[in-house]
Amino acid sequence: MSAGWLVVFAKRPLAGLVKTRLCPPLSPGQAAELYGCLLADALEESERAARSLGLVPVVAVDPPDACAEIAASAPAGFRAVAQHGPDLGARMAHVARTAAAAGARCALLRGSDSPTLALPALREALRVLASADVAVSPDRDGGYGLVALGARALLRGFASTSLFDHPMSTPTVLADTEERARRLELRVARVAPGFDVDRFEDLRRLAAERHTNAALPCPRTLALLDAHALWPAAAGAAEAGSH
């Protein structure tokens, strides 16, 4: 088998099509700009992690015609593949099958809107795959920002059915994925939790993380929020007091 894949799921950052649950209070343009920063930060950290862990950095793009655009903005070395499928679960399954067909020994699938997801968590997920088939990093909303698939999961979880053959973006998506894995007789483990920036209150979580961790892997995102004063009021006050 070849090296494993580290896959960042990405969307074209267009106003009205990304981070719509942040609107209001953000405008569609502000939400798209914020997502563009989240994506750039995720790509940069993932490229660094891929080099450190011996993985192939891949960006999975939606819509497919944005592959060239997103690849051009990604750090050197990224491979771009198109997302295909009617929903997120189908698109994740397609990417997993693509990785398996390429001979990848594992595939770490991460979102582009998890600003605190960094090398240590990715390293932990890779380590856990030595004794598990699937490793997930839970989010606080019942989902997950990272799912790592070992060789057995790539073969069994996507041969005739899909590990992700259930509704996604729901409060039970983590539990549903874990249950699906058990039905496929795959060993599942959890790694350190994280969070996505989906709603405005998630920026309060990011502000709290920033207060305790000066090395967050999302400098563009933090700079944008600072420059345009996009923090929630309480977080903004805390940020002002910390400078």
Image (cartoon, rainbow, N blue to C red):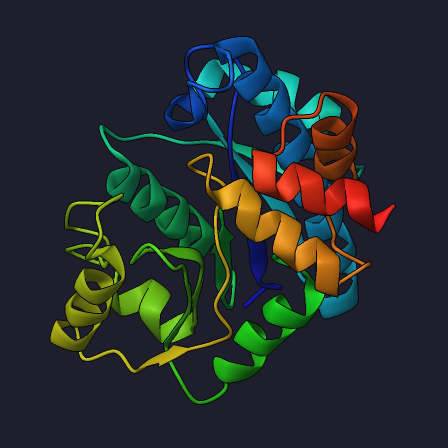
* Residue 100 shown left or right of residue 36 in the figure: left
Q: How many labels does the image show?
A: 0
* Residue 240 shown left or right of residue 225 in the figure: right
Q: Using the image, determine if residue 235 lies above or below residue 96.
A: above
Residue in the picture at 29% in, 82% down: 187
Say which quarter of the image contains residue 72.
Answer: top right
Residue in the picture at 52% in, 61% down: 104
**Front-most of 207 and 61?**
207
Q: Where is residue 140 in the image (x, y as percent from the top left)?
A: 38, 59
Q: Using the image, determine if residue 196 lies above or below residue 183.
A: above
Q: Is residue 236 visible?
A: yes
Q: Position of residue 179 (x, y in %)?
A: 16, 70
Q: Position of residue 158 (x, y in %)?
A: 26, 57
Q: Which image quadrant: the N terminus? A: bottom right
Residue in the picture at 74% in, 38% down: 222
Q: Using the image, determine if residue 185 lies above or below residue 1.
A: below
